[in-house]
Image (cartoon, rainbow, N blue to C red):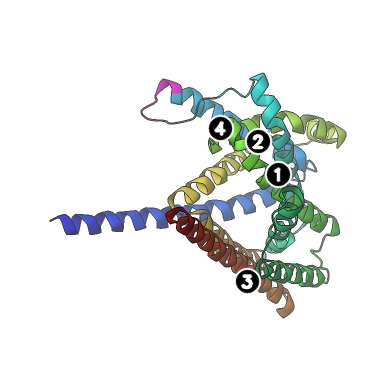
Amino acid sequence: MYQPLEKENLFTKYIRIAGVVAAYWVISILTVFVNKALLSGLQLDAPLFVTWFQVLTSSSICFIMSLLGKRYPRAITFPEGNPFDGETFRKVVPLSILFTAMIATNNLCLKYVGVAFYYVGRSLTTVFNVILTYVLLGQKTSPKAVLCCVLIIAGFWIGVDQESLTESFSLIGTIFGVLGSLSLSLYSIYTKRTLPHVNQQVWLLSYYNNVYSAVLFIPLMIVNGEVREVWNYKHLLEPWFWGVMTIGGICGFAIGFVTTLQIKVTSPLTHNISGTAKACAQTVIATSWYQESKSFLWWTSNAVVLLGSAFYTRVKQVEMDQLHREQMNSQKV
């Protein structure tokens, strides 16, 4: 009787993992399409306001979960923390500035480029990771990993060249994509330095980032002239407008949740593989949804970027396994 129970538990585990990965795919792709509709389809030229409302929604949800976690600890688990603590603010706000830059540039990229090109437009994150890891941390990268980065750069270059031949090409959107990749790389590096200050609690760090970012976006919106744009928006007082804005905010919170959950039930490596495959599906869905016709070289650029990213993930996995074995052998000696 024990063996069937073990198999049943293993089967349940695989079902749970498949469910989480499927949820990540659905919510991630849905979030991209919802954000594209909010940023380009509302006739409201206020991308920073849309992004600000999303981080405000996420911080509000985290605040509510924090209160419910204290009241019903058996039902809801949320790490304790106060974003208004002076010491916490001093240690976390530098990362929150990068977080604000990251989500702002990503949404600005999505506003100006098509969903189909969005992945390629932001594909240099891995390249910047390698460069910044060497410049800031002094860590060298293996020749194989560097070759993967060259492959990604080649795919990005071909993609931009082919996209420039279409009516949907946006130079400013592509620039924001590159800046988004740069800010994401910086954010990833500094996250590792900041996590010890919040006891390695990813959700607590996300809560703080959203709260601080909600404040940081206010002067940015004022400088960009979006306050007047929003105030004069003809649909500002209509319920449907705030309804779709709230949906966008919930999607923004949900993608953070399912990303963390996917890493938890699988591994960072599996998450990267899943994200790469999801990007491929997202591109295919976008070209079909928007009825876009792309050239062979355009599709080739996507394939090159995806392969370069997949090969890089594999190379890093092999290197990490080898390093782990060497450490284990040295401990035995």
Q: Earlier in the sequence, mark 3 or mark 4?
A: 4
Q: Which residue is mark 1?
A: 103
Q: Earlier in the sequence, mark 2 or mark 4?
A: 2
Say if mark 1 contacts mark 4, CB within 8 Å.
no
Say if mark 1 contacts mark 2, CB within 8 Å.
yes
User: As displayed, is residue 236 above or below residue 30?
Assistant: above
- Compare residues 177 and 320 and report the one nearer the observer: 320
- Say which quadrant the C terminus sits in: bottom left
User: As displayed, is residue 135 above or below residue 237?
Assistant: below
- The mark lying in front, picked from 3 and 1, is 3
**Can see residue 171?**
yes
Report the Cα–Cα distance between label 2 and label 3. 33 Å
Secondary structure state at the residue bearing disc 3: helix
- The mark lying in front, picked from 1 and 4, is 4
Mark 3 is surrounded, within 10 Å at the Cα level, by few (under 14), some (14 to 19) or many (20 or more) other residues, namely: some
Residue 311 is left or right of residue 223, and the answer is: left
Residue at left 83%, top 60%? 170
Identify the disc placed on residue 307.
3
Report the Cα–Cα distance between label 3 and label 1. 26 Å
Where is residue 153 drawn, in percent x and y? 75, 67
Q: Earlier in the sequence, mark 1 or mark 4?
A: 1
Q: Amino acid at mark 2?
A: Val
Identify the disc placed on residue 55.
2
Where is residue 47 drawn, in percent x and y? 76, 43
Identify the disc placed on residue 204.
4
Residue at left 70%, top 50%? 185
Q: Amino acid at mark 4?
A: Leu
Which span is picked out in magenta? Answer: 70-76
